[in-house]
Structures are given as structure tokens and as C-alpha cells.
Image (cartoon, rainbow, N blue to C red):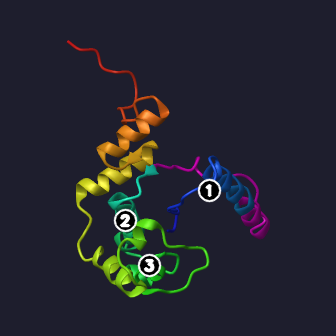
Amino acid sequence: MTNHVHLLLEPSVKEGIGNMMQSLGRRYVRYINQTYKRTGTLWEGRFKSSLVSKDKYLLACARYIELNPVRAKMVSDPKDYPWSSFGFRAEGRPDELLDEDSVYKGLGKTPKERQSNYKKCFERSIPDEEMNFIRNATQKGGIFGSKEFFDKVAKLVRRDVTLKPRGRPRKSL
């Protein structure tokens, strides 16, 4: 995108994504500052992340990301955006940075079947409720998944993981 990037990543180690983003940020800022003879920071703030369950929610998140350039009117079709995984997933274009996750592999037995079924996910628009759920989870560092997934994560971390409104709770009357 022109002012942000979306990444759908699965870390191989506990702090993998945070460490990768820190390293990427440092290297990119250094590159931009050297290339354009500038100094100072480049980013507005820390990266935002959310936990996504490996099921229909992962596919919904991928669809949200790959339709972002279409919503922004940068392209009319997700296949036309060069920095998208759509070409890899829907058309079988090779990309050494990407791999087939288990959810994608579950879309069919053959690459052609997976590609066809992935394209079908894009035949309908994203419902407003789903779009808001994804945006809210991302902006607030929440979880994108089913109630069962929320409960599983809450049990694992031994605390409530539902998103609460910001600020002090309102006094009841």
C-alpha cells in the first residue's frame, strides 16, 4: 500500500515476528535515509499485530489483505497488485517468499483445485461485520477467530483476552 503494509506471518520462534519487524524497520530506515540523504525516523509508530486462528478466519484475513489495494482503488483486480500473494495462491505464480499454509492446502487436493477454490473466496464482497472485526483486532492487538479460539488462548495465557473499551470503566448509576 502507499502508506502501510500488511503481512500474514506464522513465526517459527516465540519472538520471531517482533524481532523480524525490528530488524526490517532498522534496515529499511537506514536504506531510505542513506538513499534520500535524510535523517530521523520514518515510521509513525510501532507495528500492529493480532493473533489469527488457522481456519476460516485465516482465509478471511488473507482475503481482506489482498482486497485492500482494490478498496483503495489502486487496482481493479487483486491479481494486478504486484506485491500481493494473490498471484501465488490464485494463479500458481512462483514466489520464494511464500508457502502454502495448512488452511490453503485444505482448499483442494491439487494446486489447480486450491487455486480455483481460493479465487471463489473473492467472488463476494467482505461483509461489514467481518471487515470491522478484522480492523478492530488489528488496531487493538486483539484476536481474530472463533469464540472457541478466544477461550483456548485465554486458558493458555491464564487471563481474559476479549477486547475492552479504552479507558476507565464507566461508573454505573
Q: Is 11 positioned to the left or the right of 123 in the image?
A: right
Q: Which residue is mark 2?
A: 59
| Residue 106 position in % (x across, y down) | 37, 71
Quadrant that contains the C terminus: top left
Mark 3 to mark 1: distance in Å? 21 Å
Q: Earlier in the sequence, mark 1 or mark 2?
A: 1
Relative to 111, residue 53 above or below: above
Q: Which residue is mark 1?
A: 12
Query: Which disc number belongs to residue 89?
Result: 3
Question: Label 3 amino acid?
Answer: Arg
Mark 1 to mark 2: distance in Å? 20 Å
What residue do we see at 38% from left, 87% from top?
112
| Residue 139 position in % (x across, y down) | 43, 47
What residue do we see at 44% from left, 29% from top?
159
**Within the image, what quadrant is residue 28 found in?**
bottom right
* Residue 32 is one of the magenta-drawn residues: yes
Q: Which SS class for mark 2?
A: helix
